[in-house]
Amino acid sequence: MPAPTIYYIRHGETEWNADGRLQGAQDIPLNDLGRKQAANAGRILADLFARDGRSEQSLAFVASPLGRARLTMELVRGALKLPPDDYAVDDRLREIGYGDWEGSTLRQMQSSDPEVFAKRQAEKWTVPPPGGESYASVQIRMSDWYRQLTADTVAVAHGGTARALMVALGIETPASAADLTIEQGAVYVFGDDGLQKYS
């Protein structure tokens, strides 16, 4: 059986994204731009399905439990003319936990804990923030999520989980993925041809 195709969407922008603050487990809502980005991702998805002769009904839909991902999913489904709340939620798709650093900018993290900050900058995949998670641990839960997929899936989650999935599937290395920008309002398609981005 071929590996499932994943249509992966990062949640739309929040005010903390705009301010450069780490969100992690904090439930920060989408801002106006974020809602537009989510609807745009839904339109991109509709175009991809039309191009590929796909029926929306043939796919599974799953989101991170965090509100910014769930609202993004509901706006995506609205753009596809599907019932907004008919999707699954999976805790393994939650964002990487930034622990004590949640709500902080990079500059604030550096000034509050310069030693740990420097160590994490040098080894971002394996060093967790104080009280938080490492990317390596997120990679384990994303691998676990991927292995249980049985159908082509639309997933709405986060930048950190996208990076972890890319490494889990051998598309990126820990070094290349750690600082990779994951675009909001785009659709990342993990399929037989590797990874394609549509925006």
Image: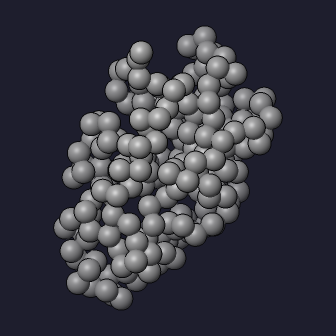
The reply to whether residue 199 is visible in this rendering is no
Q: Is residue 53 above or below residue 194?
A: above
Q: Nearer the viewer, residue 116 or 199?
A: 116
Position of the N terminus, as image quadrant, is top left
Residue 81 placement, left or right of 125:
right
Q: Nearer the viewer, residue 2 or 28?
A: 2
Residue 35 placement, left or right of 144:
right
Residue 134, given in percent of the width and then of the height, sits at: 33, 63
Q: Quadrant of residue 197?
A: top left
Residue found at x 47% / y 46%: 183
Residue found at x 37% / y 20%: 192
Q: Quadrant of residue 166?
A: top left
Residue 89, given in percent of the width and then of the height, sits at: 63, 47
Furthest residue toward top: 53
Residue 109 placement, left or right of 34:
left
Residue found at x 32% / y 36%: 169
Q: Quadrant of residue 32?
A: bottom right
The reply to whether residue 15 is visible in this rendering is yes
Residue found at x 49% / y 58%: 95
How many marks are shown on the rendered structure? 0
Q: Is residue 143 above or below residue 7?
A: below
Judging from the image, the colouring scheme is one colour
Residue 193, given in percent of the width and then of the height, sits at: 35, 21
Q: Is residue 140 above or below residue 148?
A: below
